[in-house]
Amino acid sequence: MRTYKIFTDGACDLAEDWCIEHQVTVMPIYYSLASAMPVPFPDGRAFRFDDFYEILKQGTPVKTSAPSLEDCKELMRPTLEKGEDILYTGLSSKLSGAFNAVRLAALDLKEEFPEREIAVLDSGCASHGLGLLLKQLAEQREKGANFEKICQFCTEARQHIRHFFTVSDLLYLKRGGRISGTTAIMGTVLQIMPVMQMMPAGMIENVAKVRGRKMALRNIADMTGEQAKPDTSVIVGHCSNVEDAVFVRDILHRKYHIRDVQIQPLGPIIAAHGGASAIACFCIAE
């Protein structure tokens, strides 16, 4: 059977050790603080989450950028030279230019390696939602799924990943073009919190507006608990808001009897757009 490698990008928020163990190659995405030079994430060094979150709390602007065409080709070419095929699925194409950069790189590399298969599939996911998808892909590969099967599985499995999240600092959503400046100011003054969902197509939609942080947290916990597939992992992501993450986890334990609820940090690529107040739930739905 022809061998293949799974590629993703730095928005997956998976531990580096896990990616090495399961042979998932992570393509860096860049972030920059204020006017500083862009920094790749991951870059092979231990990332200091607390330091980054403190920067967010201080209001320092953080921008993200996709890898270049040459970045993508440089990372993918050695795998193709070894005679292996590539499946790439990374951050939703609706949220980043990374998908298009990889797609264009794949077109160029296909001319160099016409005998190789390169599948570039849109995950429609982000952060630990993308991580949940990648864990399923790695499991399928380890069970012996061939290239055609793994691509089909990826297309189907992405439809069942759910993302729910809320933020308190609406100015981050304003910077990202998700809400208007007036809505951000009024929402902050009145303590109106958005409850948002990333839809399976990769678009973010505001599904509720509630008053107060605790009510918003209860909402994302309830939506997750009602949709999560039994006996699967649920991940609660946070940006130094461990108490809020525990609040959500406890609802999932107590009200919905979900046993495996993991509290994990949100990486810089996603945190840059949600801000230090972001709390998110990720699950696999029925």
Image (spheres, grey):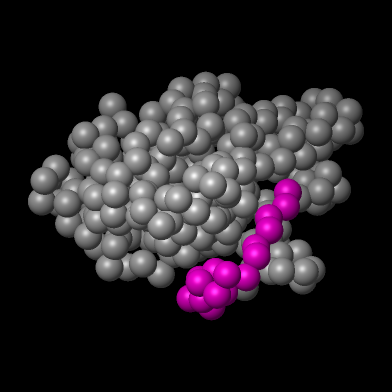
Q: Is residue 203 visible?
A: yes
Q: Which of 158 and 271 is in front in this view?
A: 271
| Residue 135 seen in this snapshot | no
Percent of width and height locating residue 154? 51, 29
* x then y, percent, for residue 129: 44, 43
Query: Is 266 rendered above or below residue 143?
Result: below
* Closest to the observer, 124 or 137: 124
Q: Is residue 209 magenta?
A: no
Q: In which quarter of the image is the C terminus?
A: top left
Give the residue at x 71% y 69%.
34
Q: Is residue 54 magenta?
A: yes
Query: In the picture, residue 37 is in which quadrant?
Result: bottom right
Q: Where is residue 248 in the image (x, y as percent from the top left)?
A: 24, 55
For this view, does 69 lie left or right of residue 198?
A: right
**Of residues 225 and 89, the one drawn nearer to the viewer in this rendering:** 225
What stretch of residues is rendered in magenta? 48-66
Image point 14% across, 43% down: which residue? 256
Q: Where is residue 157 in the image (x, y as percent from the top left)?
A: 43, 28
Residue displayed at 81% across by 33% down: 104
